[in-house]
Amino acid sequence: MVERPRKWAIITGASSGIGRALAFEFAAGGFNLLLTARNEAGLAEVAAHCRDKHRVDTEVVAADLSCADSVQNLINVLQTGSRYYEVLVNNAGFGMHGDFASADIEQNVQLVNVQLTAALRLTRAVLPGMIERRSGRILNVASVYSFSPVPFQSVYAACKAFLLSFSSALQNEIKGTGVTVTVFCPGITQTEFRSRAGIGEKRDSGMSAEAAARIAYIETLRGKHIVVPGLVNRLYVFMTHLLPVPMVPTIIRFINRQRGQNHT
């Protein structure tokens, strides 16, 4: 009888979108899964699919990562028992759309907590063990907006820029340890993310969550550092490097208006 794999992958925001698709990818690759998100029913559905189809072990931890107590509870779960976590996927997040002056400041703070504070705490919780074992992969899901300021999504884009900077610095710090950091920077993806953020967009625009997750999974296991999937997205990043810094937000604002996003 073949033993089940001992390796575990932690995936935040795993109940839908790219996180859900990543859960399926890692399960197909033989990883046991610890899945977390706010939507416990959605998590249970993903976990059941992975168990039934790929014969891996799963654990579900419903958590609101904007809440410090929930993050600490999740870390307590990670530190209990003898499992070793080979992969951490910091994917959880949400977006906000609108001018900062009239935005709900508490929602913006929650956005920062989910996308940055939780990711930092979880990374710090698992990284020492990875370094000790000289084996591990950290995947931080960022965005093409990591490379540019974005009017009307100012805090969201700033969070993604932080993830890119942090990931690059961390990758340098741990060079030679056997642990790698991948920062995944997709563009528009076909998920519920944009509608929940109040962003107008054609339903069928962008890459599918499954295609994005497949690329992220492969490149993470390869240890590639910065991954920008798709030619259009790579052209976008090239443009942001080519143009003068003060001009970039104005051009992005114009492009987004042409795409039908509901701002002036």
Image: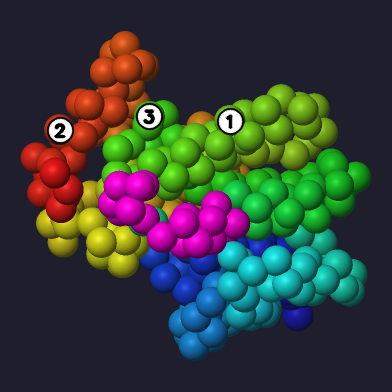
Give yes or no for residue 111 being in the magenta stretch.
Answer: yes
What residue lies at 41% left-to-right and 60% top-to-bottom? 104
- Position of the C terminus by quadrant: top left
What residue lies at 50% left-to-right and 43% top-to-bottom? 159
Q: Earlier in the sequence, mark 2 or mark 1?
A: 1
Amino acid found under the numbered disc labelled 1: Ser
Position in image of residue 148 (x %, y %): 38, 29
**Residue designated by label 2:** 254
Position in image of residue 205 (x %, y %): 17, 52
Q: Earlier in the sequence, mark 1 or mark 3?
A: 3
Residue 73 is at least partly visible in this image: yes
**Residue designated by label 3:** 148
Furthest residue toward front: 101
Q: Is residue 2 left or right of residue 223?
A: right
Please provide the residue range marked out in magenta.
97-114
Give yes or no for residue 13 being in the magenta stretch.
Answer: no
In space, the residues marked 2 and 3 are separated at their CA atoms by 14 Å
Q: Is residue 131 above or below residue 107?
A: above
